[in-house]
């Protein structure tokens, strides 16, 4: 897999706006983004505010002067930086030009020096390429001091089924735990899985977790937190499996012996109300579970 230049440049502190790409026909040179908030350190390298950044992409075919001239014909006015990720078939001094367009061209050596200096002065830490590319898509969800307040789904459909009215309830917060569970599903084969499990009046798989930026100041209500949760039954699942002669439903059993569990203290937004017979109820706003007869 080729290096993700956008991810690399952002890791190096380069501010790159990837929206509103210039309208140009497809070709060997493609747009990466537009520079903004250029630091004095980066400006010394010849890059400037508002400069459009392009790449030749990786490949065996070298970047030739015809390819640059063709791109330059449609390039908008302004400053441009082309990062040549492939070898060049012409000398840098022969780079074509056009009126009202300033072109800077980085060779593979220029790019290597840019990254290398960042490694030397500590701005870039050598890590797995996959981790580098995926760094922004997998941020650290729980950082700092807890408890963290989960974002509710605001799904009140179960209340309608039970004939309850959310407008007559009051919002509350429930102290709870969230477990990040990693382990092995064993069935016709083996599969490593990671699941979020909410421990609040029971155990519930949460497909996706989000946090509120600021926790509301609400009264706390308590539901039972399982002090020794078992995840085997919860995380086991029955799914379709193809054996070559058709699709069959097979059980995939979660192996508790392989479980690696990380716990987080959280607050769960909820609503507490009273039914017509006077019994209390609590709707968990994250799992959607309705707890009756409190």
Image: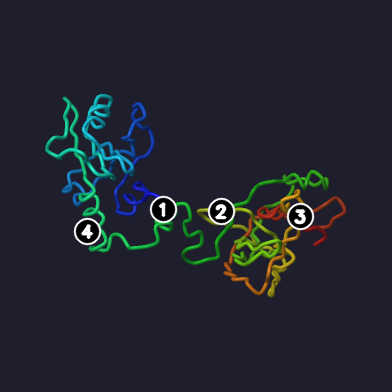
- Residue 117: mark: 4
Q: Position of residue 227 (x, y in %)?
A: 68, 74
Other-residue count near label 4 (Cα within 10 Å), few / some / many at <14 / 14–19 / ≥20: few
| Residue, far front | 245
The answer to whether the residue labelled 1 contacts the one labelled 3, judged by CB atoms less than 8 Å apart, is no
The answer to whether the residue labelled 1 contacts the one labelled 4, judged by CB atoms less than 8 Å apart, is no
Other-residue count near label 2 (Cα within 10 Å), few / some / many at <14 / 14–19 / ≥20: some
- Residue 290: mark: 3
SS class, disc 4: helix
- Residue 210: mark: 2
Q: Is residue 159 left or right of residue 118?
A: right
Who comes first in sequence, dot 4 or dot 3? Answer: 4
Residue at (72% x, 51% y) in the render: 244
Who comes first in sequence, dot 1 or dot 4? Answer: 4
Q: CA distance from mark 4 to mark 3?
A: 57 Å
Q: CA distance from mark 2 to mark 1?
A: 22 Å
| Residue, far left | 93
Residue at (57% x, 58% y) in the render: 149
Res 201 visible = no
Closest to the observer, 75 or 157: 75
Who comes first in sequence, dot 2 or dot 1? Answer: 1
The answer to whether the residue labelled 2 contacts the one labelled 4, judged by CB atoms less than 8 Å apart, is no
Q: For the residues carrying marks 3 and 2, which lies nearer the camera in this image?
A: 2
Q: Is residue 226 left or right of residue 211?
A: right
SS class, disc 3: strand
Q: Quadrant of the C terminus?
A: bottom right
Who comes first in sequence, dot 2 or dot 4? Answer: 4
Q: CA distance from mark 1 to mark 4?
A: 20 Å
């Amino acid at each position: 897999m080729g290096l993700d230049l956008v991810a690399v440049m952002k890791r190096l502190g380069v501010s790159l706006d990837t929206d509103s790409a210039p309208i140009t026909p497809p070709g060997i040179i493609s747009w990466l983004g537009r520079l903004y908030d250029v630091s004095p350190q980066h400006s010394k390298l010849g890059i400037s505010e508002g400069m459009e950044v392009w790449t030749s992409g990786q490949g065996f075919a070298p970047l030739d002067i015809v390819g640059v001239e063709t791109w330059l014909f449609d390039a908008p006015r302004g400053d441009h930086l082309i990062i040549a990720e492939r070898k060049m078939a012409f000398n840098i001094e022969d780079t074509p030009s056009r009126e009202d367009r300033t072109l800077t061209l980085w060779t593979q050596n220029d790019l290597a020096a840019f990254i290398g200096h960042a490694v030397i002065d500590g701005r870039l830490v050598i890590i797995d390429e996959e981790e580098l590319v995926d760094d922004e898509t997998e941020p650290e969800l729980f950082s700092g001091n807890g408890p963290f307040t989960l974002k509710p789904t605001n799904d009140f459909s179960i209340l309608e089924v039970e004939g309850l009215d959310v407008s007559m309830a009051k919002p509350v917060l429930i102290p709870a735990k969230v477990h990040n569970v990693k382990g092995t599903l064993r069935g016709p084969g083996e599969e490593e899985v990671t699941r979020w499990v909410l421990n609040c009046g029971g155990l519930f798989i949460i497909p996706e977790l989000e946090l509120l930026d600021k926790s509301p100041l609400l009264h706390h209500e308590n539901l039972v937190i399982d002090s020794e949760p078992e995840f085997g039954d919860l995380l086991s699942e029955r799914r379709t499996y193809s054996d070559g002669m058709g699709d069959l439903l097979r059980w995939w059993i979660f192996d508790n012996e392989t479980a690696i569990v990380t716990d987080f203290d959280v607050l769960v937004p909820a609503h507490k109300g009273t039914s017509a017979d006077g019994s209390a109820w609590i709707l968990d706003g994250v799992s959607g579970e309705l707890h009756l007869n409190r």
